[in-house]
Image (cartoon, grey):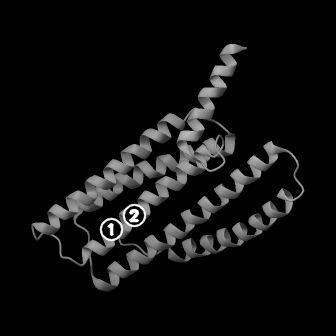
Amino acid sequence: MINEDMSGSKKVSDVEYRIDFLTNKLTGFFIKISSVTKSGDDEKLIGGLHHVTNDIERLGDYAILLFGETKYMKEKKVKFLDQTKEELGQIYKNISEMFDLGFDAFSNRRTENFKKISNLHKIVKKQITTTRNEHVVRLSSGIYPVEVSKSIYSVLFSLQRIADHIVNIAFSIRSTTGSKKEALKAIAMEKKRMQVQ
């Protein structure tokens, strides 16, 4: 979007199709094994994996939305200012780091980077708010045409939701729903138990 490059749209579309296919298969599998599972821990694990599968599926959906917005902007000859591109680039950089840390946490069942993921999430939310506010100022001063608003708000909403889903995926290793608060509380309780022993 920042570079107005649509060359990856077919690849993104193909990957999103595979994600949707796998999501359906995994959901059916989770339902099947949960009906025979007796252990509470297993049920929590299956529930958590089900949530993560849905979060990953949503990441694919937002990738498609961003490509759709890029296509719309090209067709309507709507362009972002360099300042907006720079702001979006910074947000993307932080989300990319969150993605790497979040999937590492999930894949390796590690909690060491929870604090960093949480801090990056706060930074991204603040950057999105700042970019939204800057857009209003640019719009009011006539720097931007009104047509740009739809695209900026759509992109910022998608980036916010992507960051939220990454947090859910990372924190799911200590919370079935991926709740940051619940996961951090579980870790604090684990530390207390370790200190008592």
Image coordinates for residue 76, horizontal then vertical, percent: 29, 84
**Which quadrant of the view contains residue 67?**
bottom left
* Quadrant of the rendering where the N terminus is positioned: bottom left
The amino acid sitting under disc 1 is Tyr
Task: Say which residue appears at 80% left-offset and 63% top-offset.
Answer: 31
Position above or below: 115 against 106: above
**Which quadrant of the view contains residue 114?**
top right
Q: Identify the mark at residue 153; answer none if there is no mark.
A: 1
Front residue of 44/129: it is 44
Image coordinates for residue 83, horizontal then vertical, percent: 22, 59
* Quadrant of the rendering where the C terminus is positioned: top right
Q: In the picture provided, is 152 more to the left or to the right than 12?
A: left
Residue labelled with disc 2 = 157
Q: Mark 1 Cα within 10 Å, few/some/many (few <14, many 20+)?
A: some
Q: Among all residues in the image, which is located at the extreme bottom?
A: 75
Front residue of 39/55: it is 39
Q: Among all residues in the image, which is located at the extreme left?
A: 141
Q: Mark 2 Cα within 10 Å, few/some/many (few <14, many 20+)?
A: some
The amino acid sitting under disc 2 is Phe
Tell me the SS state at disc 1: helix
Front residue of 18/140: it is 140
Image coordinates for residue 169, horizontal then vertical, percent: 60, 50
Q: In the picture provided, is 178 more to the left or to the right than 88?
A: right
Cβ atoms under marks 2 and 1 closer than 8 Å:
yes
Position above or below: 152 against 129: below
Task: Say which residue appears at 66% left-offset and 15% top-offset.
Answer: 195
Task: Say which residue appears at 40% left-offset and 55% top-offset.
Answer: 92
Tell me the SS state at disc 2: helix
Image coordinates for residue 161, horizontal then vertical, percent: 46, 59
